[in-house]
Amino acid sequence: MRHLMSLGWCAVVVVAVFTACSSDEQVGANDPDAQAIDGAGATDAAADGATCSCDASSCGTRICGRSACGFPCGECEPDEFCFVGTECQTGVGPGTPCGDGFGDRVWEGDRGFRTCPTDPDAQQACTCTGGGADAWASCDAACVEVCAQTPAGITCGAPGCTLGTEVCCIPTAATNDRTCVAGSCPVSNYTRACDGPEDCAGGICCGGDNLWTATCVTTGSCAPVDQYCHTGVDCGGGTPFCCPAPAIDVRTCSATQVAGCT
């Protein structure tokens, strides 16, 4: 998961009380790790003291999907789907999911953010009709640059583990039963200590012998094991695409672009 970006100003779109923020500088096409830098080399927040108001409090009753201002509120287990943001239900969601501007799935009836049709660096809030990847309707009139990025933390179902104090423990005999533990995981559990480079203080997040385990590596590459990512920005070299992994709730860098890759 990602750090919330510090941004300079907020704009309110009067549709479903929608609030979003934009930085003083263009931060690029949904680069989750980018920060706006001023002329002196300082981040926007350091330069003007401003911070974006879109945070976890915007989720309200949501436990999965994104809030009205774009904050990621959590993820469901691999065998579940996010039902209109308020619960994780077992099985496959209604209809065929839409693909949002962040590489995630949004199921029929839920709100999400597609890439703005007129600006690839911005997003537009819409409702998924359940008719496929681009089956959006009831879109907001204006596009905005969503300010919220995935907060630092570890994907472990919903809502995830607190980075620095917890790890995600996944039983080897029941990989859908995940828990956050302060300290070390019990015997016969896989340990996931990161899910992307934002968790690794300048390093990268590497899987172990399987995708249920992950740990930070400070130098070099993850080869021959997989590198965890959130978007293609996290990847590079011979594996430039960030693609859904078989474990579903994580993504890994890949040399081949397939459906769902960013």
Image: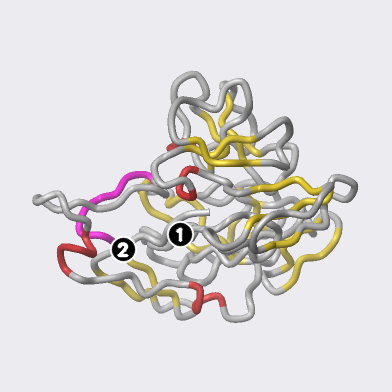
- Disc 1 target residue: 124
- Label annotation for residue 210: none
Percent across and percent down for residue 48 are 16, 68
The reply to whether discs 2 and 1 touch (Cβ–Cβ < 8 Å) is no
The residue sitting at the right extreme is: 173
Q: Vertically, is 36 above or below 233? A: below
Percent across and percent down for residue 239 are 52, 24
Asked whether 251 or 161 is in front, the reply is: 161
Q: Main secondary structure of the magenta part?
A: loop
At x 30% / y 72%, what residue is drawn? Answer: 10
At x 82% / y 50%, what residue is drawn? Answer: 187
The residue sitting at the left extreme is: 40
Q: Vertically, is 232 above or below 31? A: above
* Element marked by disc 2: loop
Q: Which of marks 2 and 1 is in front?
A: 2
Task: Tell me where residue 144 sits by quadrant.
Answer: bottom left
At x 61% / y 21%, what residue is drawn? Answer: 224
Q: Dot 1, how many residues are within 10 Å of its Cα: few (below 14), some (14-19), or many (20+)? A: many
81 left or right, relative to 120? right
Q: Give the range drawn in magenta.
A: 22-29
Asked whether 144 or 172 is in front, the reply is: 172
Q: Label 1 is placed on what type of residue? A: Gln
Q: Vertically, is 24 above or below 260? A: below
Q: Dot 2, how many residues are within 10 Å of its Cα: few (below 14), some (14-19), or many (20+)? A: many
* Element marked by disc 1: strand
Task: Tell me where residue 212 sits by quadrant.
Answer: top right
Label 2 and label 1: CA atoms lie apart by 20 Å
99 left or right, relative to 32? right
- Disc 2 target residue: 6
